[in-house]
Image: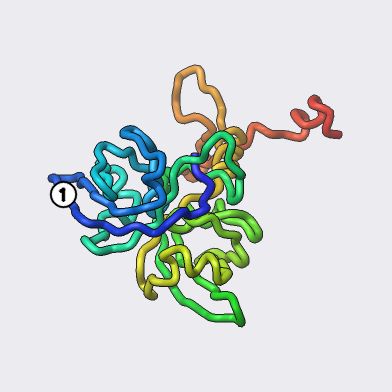
């Protein structure tokens, strides 16, 4: 588990490309203080496993599913990436719960400066926007940020100078793709609300509507709430 508090910015030094996968070699400094083979490192918000290390670089394999879901496939030698080690059990929880499992990607729409802050607008698909709420949390390229605005097309965050100076976000350009991870709590709540056991092991939590399309139905009803003390 990660917190979205970036520890340092590293650099891609080599990329080995397979048929549908890749192998990244990344240069860093701070994260090597207690790094071991098998450790998890968030690279632009993507949880990768350290498979080897030498000097100030480590290598991690990236499978096809990760390349499909994230922007790691667009990295080049020399690209800068946000790095965070997995959260230590005795560490401070400075950001929010970040799993390193990317939900999808968004596109940078604009940067607008407002005094000491910079507003960043990100366009995202509806399947991701439905989990994004104003004043909720979002991880952009692994950076824990607070959502300041959201509609049915995009969302906005506002960066303080420290975040801008210690991450790669302000080095991006309009049109660049960024990794997005929604707050995990919302996804679990949705799954529990619409989960329905079916004796025939058919699609859980869905009922066929009159027009032949599947519609999710919540297991949370007024009777359910009353039975559990919510009257």
The x and y percentages for residue 202 are 44, 26
Secondary structure, mark 1, is: strand
The x and y percentages for residue 66 are 31, 45
Determine the residue positioned at 86% across, 34% down: 231
The answer to whether residue 62 is above or below residue 5 is above
The answer to whether any part of residue 29 appears in the image is yes
The x and y percentages for residue 44 are 39, 54
Judging depth in this view, the residue of 215 and 133 nearest the camera is 133
The answer to whether any part of residue 104 appears in the image is no
Left or right of 96: which side holds 33? left
Question: Splitting the image into 4 quarters, where does residue 134 fall?
Answer: bottom right
10 Å crowding of disc 1: few (<14), some (14-19), many (20+): few
Judging depth in this view, the residue of 8 and 5 nearest the camera is 8
Question: Splitting the image into 4 quarters, where does residue 226 fall?
Answer: top right
The x and y percentages for residue 65 are 29, 43
Query: Which residue matches tag 1?
Result: 16
Left or right of 175: which side holds 188? right
The answer to whether residue 120 is above or below residue 225 is below
Determine the residue positioned at 61% across, 82% down: 115
């Amino acid at each position: 588990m990660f917190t979205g508090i970036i520890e340092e910015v590293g650099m891609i030094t080599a990329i080995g490309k397979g048929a549908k996968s890749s192998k990244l070699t990344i240069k860093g400094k701070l994260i090597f203080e207690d790094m071991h083979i098998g450790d998890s490192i968030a690279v632009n918000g993507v949880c990768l496993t350290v498979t080897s290390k030498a000097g100030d670089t480590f290598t991690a394999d990236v499978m096809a599913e990760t390349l499909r879901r994230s922007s790691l496939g667009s990295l080049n030698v020399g690209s800068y990436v946000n790095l965070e080690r997995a959260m230590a059990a005795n560490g401070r929880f400075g950001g929010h719960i970040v799993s390193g499992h990317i939900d999808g990607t968004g596109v940078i729409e604009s940067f607008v400066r407002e005094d000491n802050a910079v507003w960043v607008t990100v366009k995202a698909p509806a399947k991701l926007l439905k989990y994004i709420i104003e004043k909720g949390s979002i991880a952009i390229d692994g950076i824990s940020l607070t959502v300041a605005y959201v509609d049915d097309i995009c969302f906005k965050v506002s960066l303080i100078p420290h975040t801008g100076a210690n991450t790669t976000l302000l080095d991006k350009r309009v049109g660049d793709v960024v990794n997005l991870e929604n707050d995990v709590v919302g996804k679990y709540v949705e799954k529990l609300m619409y989960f329905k056991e079916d004796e025939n092991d058919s699609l859980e939590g869905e009922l066929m509507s009159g027009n032949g399309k599947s519609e999710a139905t919540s297991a949370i009803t007024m009777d359910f709430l009353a039975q559990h003390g919510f009257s």
